[in-house]
Amino acid sequence: MEKLTDLFPALTESQKARYEAMEELYRTWNARINVISRKDMDNLLTHHILHSMAIAKVIDFPAGSTVLDVGTGGGFPGIPLAVLFPEVRFTLCDSIGKKVKVAQAVAEGLSLENVTCVQARAESLPGRFDYVVSRAVTDLTTFYPWVKDKFNRAIFYLKGGQLEAEIADCARRCRIDPQKFFQVQISNWFRDPWFEGKKIVIISK
């Protein structure tokens, strides 16, 4: 937890306790329903919790805003962000029921009243959200049509690698102004070698 508090020094004691409890909850649930690679469980903090929280380095979600986490799997990036932003409403969706079950159980175990978990495809959800977050569920050209009518302000998409060609393809095929795309290197803040090449792709409205 020292790594987490070094990167996010403003965490309250309640938040720190929730992140500590989060690790144990995921270990318990992942033994029942595999949503994280078994060999990756020892890297849960860095590869999943901190990776999710990197989004908070580029956006301070305003209190009262709404966030849709698409393809949340077992709850990433939504659950770590929901702990960090208790005044923001998070809707976590995934089409696979067993993954939603884990996300729901972890959210309940952490007493997160600002999280709703739903089994659904993003494009079938009613209404709109202020922001969309997601963690590399597919290429951007496939992803964007799922959410193009679901957000009012911006998308924050966690993905690694050389993304210039993928972004250009998405801009062309989805008819988006290329200037609405912005890439940020997570290694600007997180010095662990695992974050080299990991990025946040921001698509503004």
Image (spheres, helix red, strand yellow):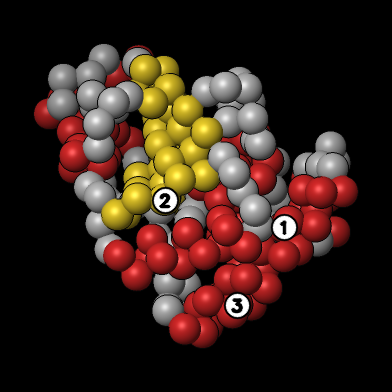
- Which residue position holds label 2? 117
Point out the tag, 3 or 1, that comes first from the N-terminus: 1
Residue at 29 percent of width and 54 percent of height: 119
**Disc assigned to residue 19:** 1
On the rendered structure, is 76 left or right of 57? left
Which corner quadrant of the image does residue 171 belong to? top left
On the rendered structure, is 185 left or right of 136? right
Whole-Å distance between the Cαs marked 3 and 2?
A: 19 Å
Q: Are marks 3 and 1 in contact (CB under 8 Å)?
A: no
On the rendered structure, is 191 left or right of 175? right
Residue at 41 percent of width and 18 percent of height: 153
Q: What type is the residue that disc 2 sits on? A: Cys
On the rendered structure, is 117 left or right of 176? right
Q: Is residue 194 visible?
A: no
Which quarter of the rendered picture does the C terminus lie within?
top left
Q: What type is the residue that disc 1 sits on? A: Tyr
Where disc 3 sits, the SS reads helix
Q: What type is the residue that disc 3 sits on? A: Arg
The count of marks equals 3
Q: Which one is in front, 118 or 145? A: 118
The spot of residue 192 in percent (x, y) is: 69, 57
Which corner quadrant of the image does residue 109 belong to? bottom right
Q: Are marks 3 and 2 in contact (CB under 8 Å)?
A: no
Whole-Å distance between the Cαs marked 2 and 1?
A: 19 Å
Where disc 2 sits, the SS reads strand
Say above or below: 4 vs 57.
Answer: below
- Which residue position holds label 3? 27
Q: Which one is in front, 150 or 161? A: 150
The spot of residue 82 in percent (x, y) is: 60, 43
Where disc 1 sits, the SS reads helix
